[in-house]
Amino acid sequence: MQNRMRVSLLALVLAYSAAAAAAAQTGDGARESVREQVLVAQKNAQISSAARLDSYLAVIPVDSPLALLSVHGLEQFLTSLSFNENGLVGYSTEAIASELSYSQAHRLLSLFGAERTLRLMPGLRVENEVDRDIHRSYVQSGELVEDHMGYRCVARATCRESTEFVCMSGC
């Protein structure tokens, strides 16, 4: 009787361990899938390199989200941008956080495939229902991608502490 209980208990423990391992793999698989989607979005964004930024600025549309920033804020933001083969991998949040609402910041960061980083942004204004919706969808939801507020991409796979910067996945 005791042997049968031990065997049953062992079988239960093994089944639980296998289920836990499968769940962990599924979580890791989901995380990797999201990371791949993020990198594809960054690489294929309208502005995904310094060269594409220069081209965009040469014929900047009248309704460009960049025009939402003050002259000083725009200069500060543009000089803070870091690109690599994965697209935008870092930027300063200072001008965005002090000058824009959630919907305005969303429009701006979408140019770079970086709108997901809104969840890291302190100080954005909520002026209307669209801002509330964006705040709710980005800030209150979890994220499987590793972007880091308070860090700056300084070299491939190297983020260093730097206030008011975001070091993005793909650095």
Image: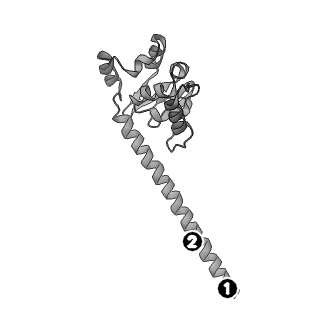
Q: Secondary structure at mark 1?
A: helix
Residue 102 at x, y = what percent?
A: 51, 28
Looking at the rendered image, the quarter that the N terminus falls into is bottom right
For the residues labelled 2 and 1, the Cα–Cα distance comes to: 18 Å
Q: Secondary structure at mark 2?
A: helix
Vertical side of 83 occupied by 22: above or below? below
Looking at the picture, the colour scheme in use is one colour
Q: How many marks?
A: 2
Give me the disc on residue 15.
2
For the point 58% across and 72% down, which residue is it?
14
- Which residue sits furthest front? 129
**Callout 1 amino acid:** Asn
Q: In this image, 117 relative to 50: left or right? A: right
**Callout 2 amino acid:** Ala
Residue on which disc 1 sits: 3
Q: In this image, 40 relative to 24: left or right? A: left
User: Upstream in the sequence, badge 2 or badge 1?
Assistant: 1
The answer to whether residue 83 is visible is: yes
Vertical side of 22 occupied by 114: above or below? above
Vertical side of 86 occupied by 58: above or below? above
Crowdedness near tag 2: few (<14), some (14–19) or many (≥20) residues, C-alpha within 10 Å: few
Residue 79 at x, y = what percent?
A: 44, 17
Crowdedness near tag 1: few (<14), some (14–19) or many (≥20) residues, C-alpha within 10 Å: few
Considering depth in this image, is 139 or 146 the residue closer to the camera? 139
Considering depth in this image, is 73 or 86 the residue closer to the camera? 73
